[in-house]
Amino acid sequence: MKFYLLVLFVTVVLFTSCNNENKSDDTSSKGRVNMLLPTSVNVGDLFLFDTTKVLNWQKEFNSSEFIRKVFSKAMSSEVSVYAVFAEDSTKYTKDEIITAMAAKSEQLNLSEIKSIYFEEEWSMDTTEPFMFEKNILSWYPVRYFKRAGSDLEEKKLIFRVKQGNPTELLAKNVISEHNLYDSVPLPFTKNFDALALAELLIKKATTGKTKVWNPMNVDKALTISEIEKNLGVAADTAFVDDPNTGESVMKIIKREIMPEEIASIVFVEDWYYDPTTFAIKKVITGIGPVRHYLKNDGEMAKTVVFMIYLGTEKTKLF
């Protein structure tokens, strides 16, 4: 599974690197300072439709209807879609879509499309007002399938949808979690400093200059002490051996903030799309660091430490 996922990501990255000159600047970021990189950070994001095994955060997005529409219009040539590994001018035909879906006719099994892969540029500015933006360069429907005689589920990008002018609301309050680390180093994240991002968000919250909110109660602003508690700051007592006397003495041990425990980020977003091109735009309305840590009983756990909201609307996560 990891091998095929890696192949999927690597091939998309190779394609992206050939098209960097086609990227457009987001005018809303002009005059801002990108804290992630001097220019921008390229990020790949796999958005899964099936949330039956996790929190049903995506209920506002009707994925099946959206996928049905884009495939219908692509098959009838009402919407232009493009080859995954070719130049922008290479449009996909109906027959090529049928081949990519391994179908024998125009009756496509769209239940095999279980996710969308986004190519994005991220930028962040921690000055007031706090800004975090995602500029979507392109997106791809992802087919999940098994070959005959194999139990291994594979993934395949079907076609590419380019940038457009998304103005029509597609879904509000789409909540997703993006992992900052992976067990396999992925090429598109090689310039992405996840630890620096975690430290910036923590500093933003613990200076007391910006209000951050309880993800379970958006009407409650968290105090600095509450933020530190959520980050694992604690004082404990332990008995240690005195090297001089050999006797056990009680010692207070303070656990400090460990930014490396921030292993994922939760985003709350409003999605827009262009009915002519089916391009998608994400407008971030909330962001929260997720702490992954080892409990006293030895089990792994995670918690959303706090939420920063980028506007007046605050969405409860749980």
Image (cartoon, helix red, strand yellow):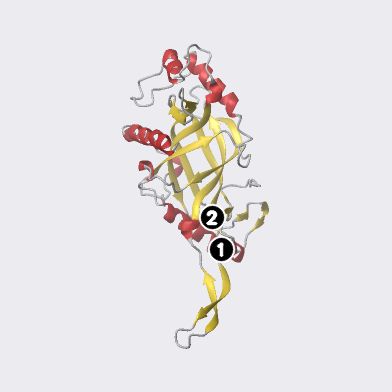
Where is residue 202 drawn, in percent x and y? 51, 59
Residue bearing mark 2: 291
Q: Tell me if residue 141 comes above or below residue 294 in the rendering.
A: above
Specify the quadrant that holds the N terminus: top left
- Local packing at callout 2 (Cα closer than 10 Å; few below 14, some 14-19, many 20+) is many
In this rendering, does residue 131 appear at all? Answer: yes
Cα separation between marks 1 and 2: 9 Å
Where is residue 41 drawn, in percent x and y? 39, 44
Residue bearing mark 1: 232
Where is residue 101 drawn, in percent x and y? 46, 20
Looking at numbered disc 2 in the image, what kind of residue is underneath it? Arg
Looking at numbered disc 1 in the image, what kind of residue is underneath it? Gly
Mark 2 residue element: strand
| Pointer 1 or 2: first along the chain | 1
Where is residue 242 drawn, in percent x and y? 48, 84
Q: Residue at x 53, y 25 (%)?
A: 112
The answer to whether 43 appears left or right of 109 in the picture is left
In this rendering, does residue 78 appear at all? Answer: no
Mark 1 residue element: loop
Q: Tell me if residue 148 comes above or below residue 216 in the rendering.
A: above
Q: Tell me if residue 176 comes above or below residue 307 in the rendering.
A: above
Q: Which of 171 and 250 is in front in this view?
A: 250
